Image: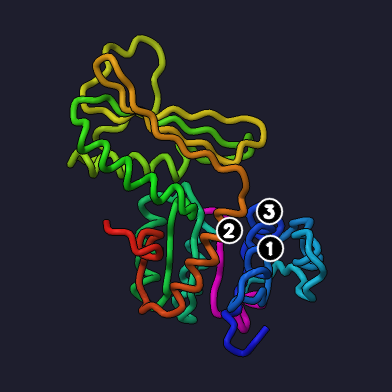
């Protein structure tokens, strides 16, 4: 660690994503694991953050007290739950911290609270997916949706059996990209569930199908179904490390930005 390192507090340190983030921060020049914390009652509490991530001990015990965890931190990397992310965003605003949010399943009210925290002084990057490949995929989907106006769009996603929100945040991002390509509003055109006698498919709808099982990290396919042909664009995630690597890249980028709310396209310099 050097004085110039960005000191990171890792939220949800006892989870699989938390462990991946600890490894990514520890391996990245310019970052250091300042603290790690988790919910009260987590079996990770009191253990060394490095040890739970499969590294040599870092001398950083996992805490269950947020205020103590944020003492001395300059950034939070947070892949937890909506209520926790909103609360952390407010604390980031109070302290002028970088806050990298990978939490999905946020409501409109949650997103409004996070935006307010960004206005109040936090430098927040919030994305449903921190993978470089997925962010390239978003651009391809938007272009394909515009170039194939008469094609039906279906988005298929599969994740592990412990994921609690559906459709996935990435699937919704892909839906938004497709809707932008068509110049339509996703909320009024999306079909999340089909059951029973549904009648013919409504023209212009964007359908979602959700699969859950096993240890799948994340598979997403966008299908453009036309007359006598289909175009399918697929991304498969094999390891959570790619999300963690994207998050640490976002943290390094955000430390030099003005307070505000950003996304991964901003971090990567992609045009909107």
Instruction: Measure the C-alpha gap from mark 2 to mark 1.
Output: 8 Å
Q: Which residue is mark 2?
A: 244
Q: Which residue is mark 3?
A: 15
Label 2: how many Cα within 10 Å (few below 14, some 14–19, many 20+)? many
Q: Is residue 68 magenta?
A: yes
Q: Residue furthest bottom?
A: 3
Q: Earlier in the sequence, mark 3 or mark 1?
A: 3
Label 3: how many Cα within 10 Å (few below 14, some 14–19, many 20+)? some
Q: Nearer the viewer, residue 119 or 267?
A: 267
Taking 129 as reference, is 71 left or right?
Answer: right
**Magenta residues (range):** 67-81
Mark 3 secondary-structure assignment = loop
Q: Position of residue 71 (x, y in %)?
A: 62, 82
> Residue at the location (52% across, 62% down)?
247
Residue 66, quarter of picture: bottom right
Q: Is residue 238 above or below residue 102?
A: above
User: Are circles 2 and 1 on residues that touch, CB within 8 Å?
Assistant: yes
Q: Which residue is mark 1?
A: 23
Label 1: how many Cα within 10 Å (few below 14, some 14–19, many 20+)? many
Taking 160 as reference, is 91 left or right?
Answer: left
> Residue at the location (43% across, 68% down)?
124
- The C terminus - image quarter: bottom left
Taking 2 as reference, is 75 left or right?
Answer: left
Q: Position of residue 233 (x, y in %)?
A: 40, 34
Q: Position of residue 168 (x, y in %)?
A: 47, 40
Residue 231, quarter of picture: top left
């Amino acid at each position: 660690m050097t004085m110039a390192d960005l000191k990171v507090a890792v939220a949800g340190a006892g989870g699989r994503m938390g462990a991946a983030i600890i490894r990514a921060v520890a391996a990245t020049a310019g970052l250091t694991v300042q603290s790690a914390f988790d919910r009260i009652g987590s079996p990770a509490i009191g253990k060394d953050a490095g040890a739970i991530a499969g590294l040599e001990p870092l001398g950083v015990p996992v805490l269950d007290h947020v205020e103590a965890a944020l003492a001395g931190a300059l950034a939070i990397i947070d892949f937890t739950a909506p209520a926790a992310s909103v609360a952390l965003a407010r604390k980031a605003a109070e302290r002028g911290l970088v806050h990298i949010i990978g939490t999905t399943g946020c409501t409109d009210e949650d997103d409004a609270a996070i935006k307010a925290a960004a206005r109040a002084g936090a430098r927040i990057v919030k994305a449903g997916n921190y993978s470089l490949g997925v962010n390239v995929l978003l651009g391809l989907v938007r272009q394909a949706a515009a170039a194939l106006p008469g094609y039906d769009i279906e988005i298929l996603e599969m994740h592990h059996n412990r994921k609690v929100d559906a459709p996935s945040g990435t699937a919704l991002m892909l839906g938004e990209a497709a809707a932008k390509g068509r110049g339509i509003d996703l909320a009024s055109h999306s079909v999340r569930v089909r059951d029973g006698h549904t009648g013919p498919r409504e023209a212009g709808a964007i359908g979602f199908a959700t699969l859950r099982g096993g240890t799948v990290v994340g598979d997403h396919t966008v299908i453009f179904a036309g007359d006598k042909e289909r175009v399918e664009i697929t991304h498969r995630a094999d390891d959570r490390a790619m999300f963690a690597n994207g998050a640490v890249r976002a943290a390094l980028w955000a430390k030099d930005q003005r307070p505000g709310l950003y996304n991964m396209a901003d971090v990567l310099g992609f045009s909107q």
